[in-house]
Image: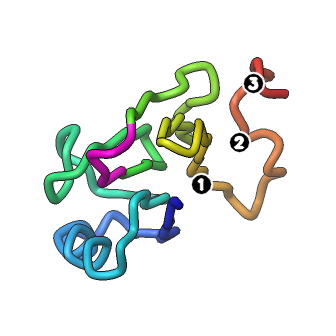
């Protein structure tokens, strides 16, 4: 089973510093973040797949993790998680309320 947490970080360093602690306390495998503050490809010892405005942070040694590049752009990130229960796709996207969400989505891909 995958447990996910969705959070808008507001580019706050304090949020990113506490992310790993909270995720581990709650048994969360994947964090779907908008406006993350990511300085490198790891946050709190977890795998990070990020774009300019979104990130997927994964904390699991039991899953193979792969970024799905054709479904990732500056506004959103898509990641494939392969676990013993099979593959699962998770995504994080920042959508601006002043625009249609369709303009924020990655271009047509093999999934749609």
Write the residue at 18% across / 40% down: 40
The range drawn in magenta is 58-63
Write the residue at 74% across / 64% down: 97
Q: Is residue 106 left or right of residue 52?
A: right
Residue beneath disc 2: 104
Q: Nearer the viewer, residue 86 or 32?
A: 86
Q: Position of residue 81 (x, y in %)?
A: 49, 39
Q: Secondary structure at mark 3?
A: loop
Q: Are marks 2 and 3 in contact (CB under 8 Å)?
A: no
Q: Judge the density around disc 2: few (<14), some (14-19), many (≥20) Cα neighbours within 10 Å.
A: some
On screen, residue 110 above or below 11: above
Residue beneath disc 3: 107
Residue beneath disc 1: 94
**Magenta run includes residue 91:** no
Q: Secondary structure at mark 2?
A: helix
- Gap in Å between the C-alphas at discs 3 and 1? 15 Å
Q: Position of residue 107 (x, y in %)?
A: 75, 24
Q: Are marks 1 and 2 in contact (CB under 8 Å)?
A: yes
Q: Judge the density around disc 1: few (<14), some (14-19), many (≥20) Cα neighbours within 10 Å.
A: many
Q: Position of residue 111 (x, y in %)?
A: 78, 27
- Residue 18 position by quadrant: bottom left
- Residue 86 position by quadrant: top right
């Amino acid at each position: 089973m995958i447990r996910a947490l969705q959070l808008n970080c507001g580019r706050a360093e304090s949020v990113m510093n506490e992310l790993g602690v909270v995720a581990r306390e709650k048994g969360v495998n994947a964090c779907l973040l908008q406006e993350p503050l990511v300085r490198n490809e790891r946050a709190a010892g977890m795998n990070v797949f990020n774009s300019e405005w979104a990130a997927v942070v994964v904390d699991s040694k039991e899953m193979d993790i792969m970024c799905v590049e054709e479904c990732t752009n500056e506004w959103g990130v898509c990641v494939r998680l392969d676990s013993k229960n099979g593959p699962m796709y998770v995504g994080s996207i920042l959508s601006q309320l002043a625009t249609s969400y369709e303009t924020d989505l990655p271009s047509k891909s093999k999934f749609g």
